[in-house]
Amino acid sequence: MQSVERNERFELAYRFVTETQESVFLTGKAGTGKTTFLKYLKEHTAKNTIVAAPTGVAAINAGGVTLHSLFQLPLHPLLPTNAGKQELLSKIRYNKQRLQLLRKMEVLIIDEVSMVRCDVMDAIDTILRSVRYQYELPFGGVQLLLIGDLFQLPPVAQNHEWAVLQEYYNSTFFFDSKAIQEQMPLLIELTTIYRQKEEQFVRLLNKVRNNQLDADDLEILNERYQPGFQPDRDETFITLTSHNNQAELINRQQLQRLTAPPYTYKAAIDGEFPENSYPADAELVLREGAQVMFLKNDTLSKRFFNGKIGVVHSLSDEEVIVRCGNENIRVQKETWDHSRYTLNRTDGKLEQDVLGTFEQYPLRLAWAITIHKSQGLTFEKVMIDAGLSFTSGQVYVALSRCTSLEGIVLLSKIQPNVIFSNQQVVDGQKALSPKGSLPQRFEEARKAFSQQLLEELFTFQQTALALKLLMQVASKHKFELNEGAEEWIGNMQFQFQQEQSVARKFLLQINQLLKEQPVVETNSQLQQRVKDAVNYFIPRFEELQQQLKQHPLITEHKTAADEVNEQLNTLFTALHTEIYFLKSGLQPFSITDHLRHKLNLVTPRVNITSYAANKKQTVVGINHPDLYFRLKTWRDRICDEQNMPIYLLANSNSLQEICTYLPFSKTHLQLLSGFGKAKADKYGDEIIEMVMGYCEEHGLETNIEAKKDSPKRERKEKSTEPKEDTKSVTLHLFNEGKTIKEIAATRKLTEGTIEGHLVDLIKAGTVKVEQLLTVEKLQTILNRIELFPEESNTAHKIALGDAYSFADVRAVQNHLQFMKENIVQ
């Protein structure tokens, strides 16, 4: 098999995919190198890429996965209505890893796209917009590379399926999907044919493909008609059939005619490998003299390739030898992988994980094969019965498998009525064909992509979002966090916004420089400005990162700490990522180098905490910090052993008072914040021992007199009336018809506190979620939670946008918890 050279069209298509954000439909006649392009791109691109195909066999051949497994698509027709989209999203269940995989994907390659149905394309579009939070962008902003020939095999839609779909689509082809109509991919056609060299045969194939055969052309083709043809035993003809049962029958009959004993070779299947994706027979039955076809390329010695025909020369239990021409080939077993894409959590790259393997001799009986399975293969001698029930494009596929006109034998004459091209395909291809010059289109697209990359580099969106969410969480837990927490975050936000302001001015300069010279690599003035900007921003972001490591946020409430910690670590990762991306600008900036630099990002494992029990930072303003940390270590150990919240034993304020007043007795201890008689009796001896030991080491005396002299808060007389629970008070006022704002004013509490009371009461069932949320809001949040059950409330809040609050999400979560616990009632 000849290798396909990288011609001008090949190079242009490659650069469109790798150096722009344009989606591309790569097409071309049979034998023009589409498969070679796919393999080359996979090996050389610097973008996070996933390869998928409509069928299991096509996916295995392309080294990818099926579209249905990647997106967990149902098998029934998928309607492009709002209700249909909602139903689709409500039924898929993605774990965190699958979500990250789809969010990190930059390019989705779909091979054999001619067989992808319109509704499948729209379903993929719906899912990607949702999981990537890019609702306004087709396919959620993912770049598409669609590969295939529309004049070959069409999509499959049963009559009852098309009866439903035809209300929404003009045809079953992918180009009639709503998403593709919204953003048409750029059609690039590979035109150099490598499979056939005869000029007359190439001309005939083009006419068959385009339904332009005249009487003279038909006569030339039908000269290959040889009724009742039987090839000589040394001639390796293969029959192309329209249906699988025809091919199996021919192969079975031919095998039975051989007199040599049969040998059966069973495949070794390990792990997960779906039967409908088997690349070869699970039980391969061969006899000496059987005609076979190789199913893989010999990448080392190049002795055979996928589609090469030979004859079994000799067999044993452990050996298969196939004769091809004058050469005997000792065939080794080959292994195929069934894989899935995963996201490497360390470096953020997309990887293929092997789920299962299929080991078998890379052979199949080859007196006959279906046209469907022959797609992409090359034969030297074929027999075709064009009188069979071929569909649109199948005659072209069958004829174009052969390297020469002389290698074709027609078992029935080709009638004009069996050569037809689907008019919808002709119209669709025409609509996709680009207007104007491709090179000019490339320069414009490359300039736009350069601008996009530089804007992404200097807008710092990850950090902006992370800071915003940290402030929201801190505001939510203001009463659980230490004093000054919000002020510290606000100061960091102010510093960051100052840098964002500088970046915005810088980007105006960048855009102007790109207008003057759009090729970023040769724009020396722009290169210098990028380098200057990078040297300006990196130390400032490193300073922000250092401030974050030494943050003063502290809480003794585990639930609050978990939410705050999530945002602290998200902010650290965002800053790390911004700094890493900026460092690509220390070298001369180029699209390819920058993308490759991004691909090599390794996200550090960090554990920045605000939880007092785990916090390692030195607390500022404490007397005797060594004693403080001895006490803190003791407290954390006791709480851990007894599974007790730290504030029940001694919160930070209590520890600070011990360090300030140095109590020498249990009576002293009871004068301090948080210590009554019971707690002093239970833990006092250990505390006093630590304090007195520390004082002895440092020559210190107790300072308890200072505490006795400090003004005391007057204690209110204990009421003999039972104290009403604060949430019950809120509920009573709410049931009277008062609004949250009115209740907050009456009780002299914040609206957030009152809202929190009501949200908590939903879990108890005393407040209905419908009393706080509109039906539309409730349904939207429910759909989101059902679609992504493993995501945090923060992630839901981000996805839902500013129209929804954390309290809204918590309200629905509490509603679901109440329903779950009271399902029997």
Image (cartoon, rainbow, N blue to C red):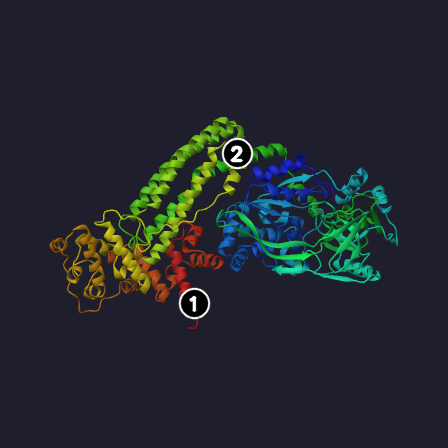
Q: Nearer the viewer, mark 1 or mark 2?
A: 2
292 and 247: which is toward the camera: 292
Q: Secondary structure at mark 2?
A: loop
Residue sitting at x 68%, y 35%: 7
Describe residue 109's horizontal placement relative to residue 398 as left or right.
Answer: left
Q: Considering only vertical position in the picture, is 219 above or below 528?
A: below
Extreme residue in the bottom direction: 825
Locate the C terminus by quadrant: bottom left
Q: Which mark is residue 590?
A: 2
Residue sitting at x 43%, y 73%: 824
Amino acid at the residue labelled 2: Ser
Q: Secondary structure at mark 1?
A: helix
- Could one spot residue 79 in this view of the protein? no
Q: Percent x, y for residue 12?
A: 63, 36
Describe residue 603's horizontal placement relative to residue 756 as left or right.
Answer: right
Q: Which mark is residue 820?
A: 1
- Near mark 2 (Cα within 10 A), the count class, few <14, some 14-19 or many ≥20, is some
Q: Percent x, y for residue 761?
A: 34, 64
Residue at mark 1 to residue at mark 2: CA–CA distance:
55 Å
Amino acid at the residue labelled 1: Lys
1 or 2: tag closer to the N-terminus: 2
Residue sitting at x 53%, y 40%: 596
Q: Are marks 1 and 2 in contact (CB under 8 Å)?
A: no
- Could one spot residue 280 in this view of the protein? yes
Q: Percent x, y for residue 521?
A: 53, 30
